[in-house]
């Protein structure tokens, strides 16, 4: 049975509607804070809906136009309009808007309490699922931005055109989402966009963690908030890598504190910069999809500027199930993958999840990953908007070199061993003094664009992936391009 509005809420709504009719210039501000369902009195709700439509069409918000646009089956009586017109508009309309919103939220909480009671009495419902549903509903109420209704074509066209206008106003023909820190990747993906699930896959030792930290740093430098769920590595280890990348102090030197005075000054500066960034790290080693949802919703609610979440890595997560076996694990990964995609859309942020790849690719001659190399790949491949693979041929070359060195040592062929060691040293020195290695980001899936392979480079000393230096460049020198942003570029 629908709730009957009380006289207090009706009077508040009437003041707001009256203010719109008497001073239409206020509607833009009011529409940003209220939506039709905030009005409990049906005639008031209908008028507000019509005002939204008139505003979109750039038509006058007066009594005559409002009356003409109200559907036949929802006609409002002359008496109802008289009540509204005779209500004096209020100068301090903000107080009435806040009160109307307060009443609306309480009304939704009352409905939610009834839902909670029904769910708690249902013996077939799992308690974790109930908690997740309730948290989601509470989050939706708190931000009042999730609409479950159908969107009419007119509304979709309007919002799409507004998006195009916004992109034009930006004056940027490449990015629509977050800057990844890699120029060619930005061109192909248009950045990481709201609601997207991005998967970064690689075999161990390729540098997945380093790559996501470099991307996180680029996003932080845009004064955006970043949330990281690190299931494999403590927060302090992640920060060590970020500080090494920012300061251009070798990671090994940072780990042992072997720094000269200039390096200490640079470390101090970078530490101060990082302390001011909106970076939040959860480094618990156990995390289910339900726990991640709960934590991220709470964090986003308290810190609205969180604009991306990163999970390292997907296969370490659980779904709270006690099932065992390969098929059960595939179902778990499917639930986790779908849960991350749904959460990205709910919170309107991109979610980046790192993923391990199957060992089977090691037996191929070309070890560059393909989509089928994703562990439990079916659901991940389906849910992801973008799938990136990180590949470094040097990792396999070094593995092969170590095996050959071990073989020569075992054979006791000192002459051949010395010649091979000299050959390896010469090869390393010829490529950026041995400190820079080629790397690739393979865009294997891109729901809204092309797929391609992007050539980048890996700066080993500073644990940093970078856009590749110009071919004619002889020496690599990291150079600050902005003292405040701590971003580094390659001298070309």
Image (cartoon, rainbow, N blue to C red):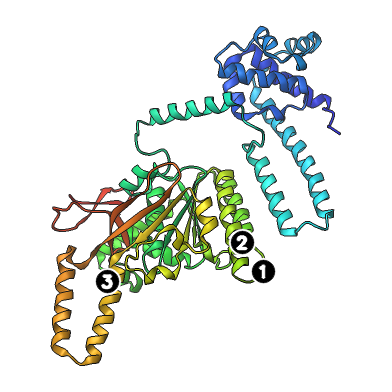
Q: Position of residue 152 (x, y in %)?
A: 61, 27
Tell me the element at label 3.
Answer: helix
Q: How far is the residue under mark 3 from the one under mark 1?
A: 40 Å
Tell me the element at label 1.
Answer: loop
Residue 248 seen by the camera: no
Q: Is residue 346 above or below residue 19?
A: below
Q: How far is the residue under mark 2 from the one under mark 1?
A: 10 Å
Residue 427 seen by the camera: yes
Tell me the residue at 25%/91% (across/down).
410
Which residue is the site of mark 3? 397
Which residue is the site of mark 2? 331
Dividing the picture into quarters, in which one does residue 138 lie?
top right
Tell me the element at label 2.
Answer: helix
Q: Which mark is residue 98?
A: none
Q: Which mark is residue 323?
A: 1
Tell me the residue at 66%/28% (across/down).
35
Q: Position of residue 207 (x, y in %)?
A: 37, 64
User: Counting other residues with Cα less than 10 Å from the Cα at mark 2, is it few (<14), some (14-19), or many (20 or more)?
Assistant: some
Q: Position of residue 223 (x, y in %)?
A: 42, 45
Q: First in sequence: mark 2 or mark 1?
A: 1
Front residue of 488 and 380 = 380
Q: Is residue 402 above or below residue 190?
A: below
Labels 2 & 1 near each other (Cβ < 8 A):
yes
Labels 3 & 1 near each other (Cβ < 8 A):
no
User: Counting other residues with Cα less than 10 Å from the Cα at mark 3, is it few (<14), some (14-19), or many (20 or more)?
Assistant: few
Q: Residue furthest right?
A: 1
Tell me the residue at 56%/19% (across/down).
56
Front residue of 142 and 363 = 363
Q: How far is the residue under mark 2 from the one under mark 3?
A: 36 Å
Q: Quadrant of the N terminus?
A: top right
Labels 2 & 3 near each other (Cβ < 8 A):
no
């Amino acid at each position: 049975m629908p709730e009957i509005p009380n006289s207090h809420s009706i009077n508040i709504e009437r003041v707001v509607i009256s203010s719109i009719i008497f001073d239409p210039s206020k509607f833009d501000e009011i529409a940003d804070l209220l939506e039709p369902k905030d009005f409990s009195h049906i005639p008031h709700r209908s008028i507000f809906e019509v005002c939204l439509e008139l505003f979109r069409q750039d038509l006058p918000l007066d009594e005559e136009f409002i009356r003409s646009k109200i559907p036949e089956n929802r006609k409002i009586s002359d008496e109802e309009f008289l009540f509204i017109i005779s209500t004096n508009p209020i100068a301090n309309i903000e107080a009435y808007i806040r009160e109307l919103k307060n009443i609306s939220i309480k009304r939704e909480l009352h409905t939610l309490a009834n839902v909670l009671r029904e769910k708690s009495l249902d013996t077939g419902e799992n308690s974790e699922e109930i908690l997740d549903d309730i948290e989601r509903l509470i989050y939706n109420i708190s931000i009042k931005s999730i609409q479950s209704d159908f969107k009419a074509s007119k509304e979709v066209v309007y919002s799409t055109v507004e998006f195009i206008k916004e992109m034009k106003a930006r004056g940027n023909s490449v990015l629509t989402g977050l800057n990844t820190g890699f120029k060619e990747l930005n061109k192909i993906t248009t950045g990481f966009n709201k609601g997207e699930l991005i998967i970064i896959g690689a075999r161990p030792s390729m540098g997945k963690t380093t790559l996501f930290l470099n991307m996180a740093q680029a996003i932080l430098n845009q004064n955006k908030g970043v949330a990281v769920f690190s299931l494999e590595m403590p927060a302090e280890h992640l920060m060590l890598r970020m500080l090494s990348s920012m300061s251009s102090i070798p990671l090994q030197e940072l780990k042992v504190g072997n720094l000269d005075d200039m390096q200490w000054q640079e470390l101090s500066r970078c530490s101060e910069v990082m302390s001011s960034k909106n970076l939040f790290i959860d480094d618990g080693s156990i995390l289910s999809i339900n726990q991640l949802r709960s934590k991220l919703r709470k964090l986003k609610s308290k810190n609205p500027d969180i604009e991306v979440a990163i999970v390292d890595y997907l296969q370490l997560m659980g779904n709270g199930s006690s099932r065992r076996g390969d098929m059960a694990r595939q179902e778990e990964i499917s639930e986790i993958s779908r849960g991350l995609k749904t959460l990205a859309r709910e919170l309107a942020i991109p979610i980046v999840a790192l993923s391990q790849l199957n060992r089977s690719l090691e037996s191929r001659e070309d070890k560059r990953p393909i989509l089928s190399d994703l562990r439990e790949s079916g659901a991940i491949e389906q849910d992801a908007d973008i799938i990136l693979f990180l590949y470094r041929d040097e990792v396999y070359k070094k593995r092969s070199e170590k095996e050959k060195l071990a073989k020569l040592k075992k054979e006791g062929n000192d002459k051949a061993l010395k010649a091979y060691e000299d050959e390896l040293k010469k090869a390393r020195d010829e490529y950026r003094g041995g400190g820079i290695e080629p790397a690739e980001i393979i865009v294997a899936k891109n729901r809204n664009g092309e797929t391609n392979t992007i050539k980048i480079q890996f700066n080993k000393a500073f644990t940093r992936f970078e856009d590749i230096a110009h071919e004619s460049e002889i020496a690599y020198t990291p150079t600050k391009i902005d003292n405040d942003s701590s971003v580094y570029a390659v001298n070309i």
